[in-house]
Image (cartoon, helix red, strand yellow):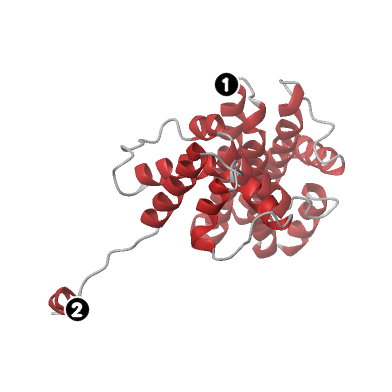
Amino acid sequence: MGFAVRTAARSLGLGLTHGRSARSPVAGALAPFVRRFTRMSAAFALVSETAILTLGPALKRREKITGRLADALAWMYLGSAAIKRFHDDGEPAGDLPFLQWATTSALAEAERALSGVLDNLPHRPAAWCVRRLAFPLGAREREPDDALGARVAHALLDDPAARRRLTRDVYLPAADEPGLGRLDATLAKVLAAAAVEPAIREAVRAGRLAGEPGETLVARAVLAGIVGEAQRKALEEAEVARENVIQVDAFDPAVYRRLRG
């Protein structure tokens, strides 16, 4: 009973402050994330103890409820792993959007799972009381918003070092191999060309270069002195690589009929 009371009081206090009253073993950018996971951990302890106390051995047969508890625990584990990796990597600023997206998503999923447990707990008075102790201010965790998603996308596209850190344990095939190897090589060429394209667009907007026909735009930009020969080559290589990487298997009619047969 003492443990139950302490768990309930801790969950209520952390819920009212959204984890801000929790102590964090680390400082800096990681501290707010650690405090929020501490708060969710307290809520998980209270909800799981309530499920055990009210259902007893019948909890084993309530697979939907135990599944939601397992989901909440798994999401907290994944979020904690993201925090640990960020800490072990030396807290690189370029990886902060990845940490924010991973932890925000994990917290939202864990809260949703715990709310699902309380929504379906057969002992309704206990579920009502525990909800107000575990989530006194209601559901506070939200999915990553579009702005954060955009930051993650820009970090993946514009920061090769961050992308390498994120995928350092993923095998990267050679650049001429279909799939990931060719995609990665194409991305490098597209990013190199992206630095040249604004000069051409600005020339078109300023009226120094006609926008049509588009197939001769780069050649005419070279003749006009807007871009150099090396930049033209980078643009053309990027376009060829981009065209190749989006191609799908193509068959002539005879081969297609043979495949269908």
* Residue 146 at least partly seen: yes
Of residue 84 and residue 171, the one placed in the foreground of this image is 171
Please state which amino acid type lies under the numbered disc 1. Answer: Asp
Q: Measured from the top left, where is residue 243 in percent x and y?
A: 40, 57
Please state which amino acid type lies under the numbered disc 2. Answer: Pro
Residue positioned 45% across, 42% down in the render: 233
Name the mark nearer the viewer: 2 or 1.
2
Dot 2 corresponds to which residue? 253
Chain-order first, disc 2 or disc 1: 1
How many C-alpha atoms fall within 10 Å of the one at disc 1: few (<14), some, or many (≥20)? Answer: few
Label 1 sits on a secondary structure element that is: helix
* Residue 145 at least partly seen: no
Residue positioned 56% across, 38% down in the render: 77
Q: Measured from the top left, where is residue 173 in percent x and y?
A: 32, 38
Q: Quadrant of the N terminus?
A: top right
Residue positioned 52% across, 40% down in the render: 231
Relative horizontal placement of residue 157, taking residue 31 as reference (left or right): left
Q: Are marks 2 and 1 in contact (CB under 8 Å)?
A: no
Dot 1 corresponds to which residue? 88
Q: Measured from the top left, where is residue 79 in percent x and y?
A: 60, 38
